[in-house]
Each structure stands twice: as C-alpha cells, then as structure tokens.
Image (cartoon, rainbow, N blue to C red):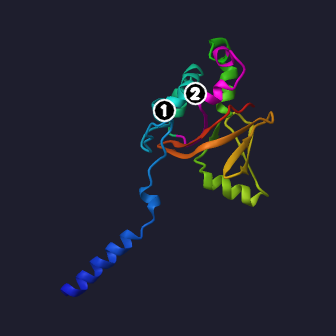
Amino acid sequence: MTKTLMRGLLAGAALAMAATPAVATQKNPTVGGAPMAASKTIVQNASAAPNLTTLVAAVKAAGLVETLSGPGPFTVFAPTNDAFAKLPAGTVDTLVQPENKAQLTSILTYHVVPGRITANDIAKKAKANGGTATYTTVAGGTLSFMKMGKGWGIKDAKGGHAMITTANVMQSNGVVHVIDSVLMP
C-alpha cells in the first residue's frame, strides 16, 4: 500500500470518527446534582442522588432493594423527595411502617414497568396511538403518557398527574425517569 493511499485512508477514518453521533459519548444526566453511572444499578444510582432519599428509604422498607438491584431490565419512574412531600402529612411515615409493607410495595411497583423504555420509546408509542402511550406496571396497573408542553406527562389510575423532569437516566439494569409527583394505583 502506498504512503499516499495510507494517508488517505487514515484521513477518511478520522473524518468518519469525527462524524460519529454524539449519542455514543453522551453522558447520563445528573440527578439532584449527583452524577449517575450507566454501569451502576438503579438502587446504587438512586442512593447517590440527594433528591431521591425518600424513595430509597421506601424501597428499603418495602424490601425491594434486591429486586431493583437485579438484572431487570426495569424502567422506574422515580418520585423526588419533593414529590413525596406533596402527599398528605404523615403519609410517608405511615407507609414505611412494617404493617403497611404490602400497600407501600403496591405503590412502589406501580412506578416500575418491565423493560428498558426510553423517552423516545414513549414518544413513538404515543405517536402510533393517537397521542397517548400506555404501559402496564409491575403492580398490574396502567400508566398513560401524553405530551404536555415540551415534556411528558403521566396520568395514573386515580387521575393524578406527574411530569417527567429528568428523562433517560441509563442504568446497568434499566432506565430511570425522575418525576415530580407520586403516582397512585
């Protein structure tokens, strides 16, 4: 191979690498200011986020740490501490009591959908279904997603609403979308 041809191939390869989409090197969004690592599990990353401490405490109280640390994949719609604070006073304290474990588990698993569902997947499904994407949760209920402004809103079984505030936080065992309200089955 001539030196000229070799230089040409190397230059072409450099141009092709420069044209590679940024998606391949795109970093995960931070959650509560904490970096999220795609190589860590849902529980590991949530435990590092200062705005998800109530969720982590609830997951521990419900005995779901092992499950959400497992291979999945899972899609978790993760309510922030502020989302839990919107609940009536005393609700979280009551739910984390051992005698309310079944109810807490039901609420938490209502925030989990089997599989790895990105915001793009939600958008595609909504477009194919007249503007609404519906997914079945691990708890057996349904969540409906619709475009609201520039983001995605979620409607729960009781007619409550939440917004996805941080989408596509990739995990080793799924994806997390941070939301601003607790969803109720």
Q: Nearer the viewer, residue 95 or 73?
A: 95
Q: Is residue 104 above or below residue 19?
A: above
Specify whether 15 is left or right of 162.
left
Q: Earlier in the sequence, mark 2 or mark 1?
A: 1
Residue designated by label 1 = 49
Q: Which residues are magenta?
A: 72-94
Rendered image quadrant of residue 128 = bottom right
Q: Quadrant of the N terminus?
A: bottom left
Q: Nearer the viewer, mark 2 or mark 1?
A: 1
Q: Can residue 78 be found in the magenta stretch? A: yes
Q: Decide whether residue 112 is among the magenta residues.
A: no
Q: Residues within 10 Å of mark 2 (few under 14, many from 20)?
A: many
Does residue 1 show up? no
Is residue 97 positioned above or below 78 on the image? above
Q: Residues within 10 Å of mark 1 (few under 14, many from 20)?
A: some
Callout 2 secondary element:
helix
